[in-house]
Image (cartoon, rainbow, N blue to C red):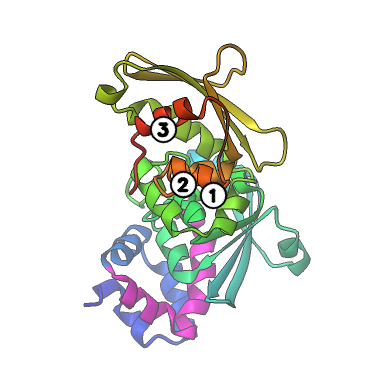
Amino acid sequence: MTPTLLEPLRTADRATADRFFADAPAEALVAAVTASDDDLLLELIGREEVRAAAVPGILRRLEEYADADRLAGVSGTVRFDLRRGSRLLESHAIRLDRGAVDLVADRDAAEAADVVLTTSLLRFVRLVSGERNAGLEYLGGGLDVEGDALLALAVGGIFRVPGHAEAAVDPTALDPDEVARAVGEASTDHLRRVMAGGFRPVVLEEVFRRLPSFVDERRAANLDLVVGFRLGGGPGEPDRYVVTLRDGAAAVTDEDEGRRDATIVCDAHDFLRLATGHLGAVAGVMRGRLGVKGDKAKALQFASVIRFPTG
């Protein structure tokens, strides 16, 4: 069943669709989109008349769909490349500057955008309506980012549900189970690219921040272990973390001195697979994707008492 507000889009010509996206109340439009299933939205935006009007119509009114404080903190030129499969359907660029939003008509300026976000038209609609988390979409491969990944995440965090004061999602607040599901959907090549870019520190800090909550306290009760992690695959020096497991509890630091029972060495994308249950420690060592310096038995003992979420 089509929400009443969206019904005119079934038969709208281009001029009617332009007026619709210029005039429809933002709060009612987002509510109608949220109430619509994917099949219905695909049917509506599958019409060329609607598709050609929808994206520029939404971008022109971006302030109405955005958290004003977050929008004021974002500056740069962002291009949206919207695809169906491998086919480019729409490409639009906006310039953000201290809360002002302007459509970029100049092709050269659009080509030189600070960041290009590539996704499907349906995902774009869901992101703008505050239903999808840009960080999770990026991890899972539903959103591709070329250029400034932190600017992309800042843009992903400006959207709010009209009628509500706060932003709908924070792309850097990554729920472990949702991260696990997203990683399970992503290809190795995609994860390698993500973990070599600007989103890398956000993901690693969030995983290690939450790691103490993944300890099986009963199984770890009598253990006294110090395990280091050296994570490569990034643009600079490897990231280093140290986890101390004692009396059933874990503590994490980024210091690199002192006692080590073992150090796990791998690329960050393989660590992310490990930390989401998609790569077992033993299998990772056997396949050469995880290396261990020091006492391998203690490294595996450590891994056996960490219950990472699997989605």
How far across and down, in percent of the image, does residue 60 sit? 54, 62
Is residue 182 shown left or right of residue 194? Answer: left
- Residue in front for this viewpoint, 73 or 307: 307
- Residue 287 badge: 1
Residue that label 2 marks: 283
Q: Secondary structure at mark 2?
A: helix
How far across and down, in percent of the image, does residue 134 sit? 47, 52
Specify the quadrant of the image occupied by residue 127: bottom left
Q: Secondary structure at mark 1?
A: loop
Q: Residues within 10 Å of mark 3 (few under 14, many from 20)?
A: some
Is residue 22 shown left or right of residue 79? Answer: left
- Residue in front for this viewpoint, 142 or 184: 184
How far across and down, in percent of the image, does residue 291 sit? 58, 37
Residue that lies at the very extreme toward the right in this rendered image:
108
Q: Residues within 10 Å of mark 1 (few under 14, many from 20)?
A: few
Residue that label 3 marks: 303
Q: Residue at x 42, y 55 (%)?
A: 184
Circles 2 and 1, Cβ within 8 Å, touching? The answer is: yes
Mark 3 or mark 2: whose residue is earlier in sequence: 2
- The answer to whether residue 307 is visible is yes
Q: Residue at x 58, y 46 (%)?
A: 288
**Dominant secondary structure, magenta:** helix
How far across and down, in percent of the image, does residue 229 sit? 56, 29
Q: Which residues are magenta?
A: 36-65
Q: Residue at x 29, y 61 (%)?
A: 31
Residue type pointed to by label 3: Ala
Q: Is residue 41 magenta?
A: yes
Residue type pointed to by label 2: Ala
Q: For the residues marked 1 and 3, what is the alpha-carbon distance in whole angstroms?
A: 16 Å
Q: Residues within 10 Å of mark 2 (few under 14, many from 20)?
A: few
The quarter of the picture where the N terminus appears is bottom left
* Mark 1 or mark 3, whichever is nearer to me: 1
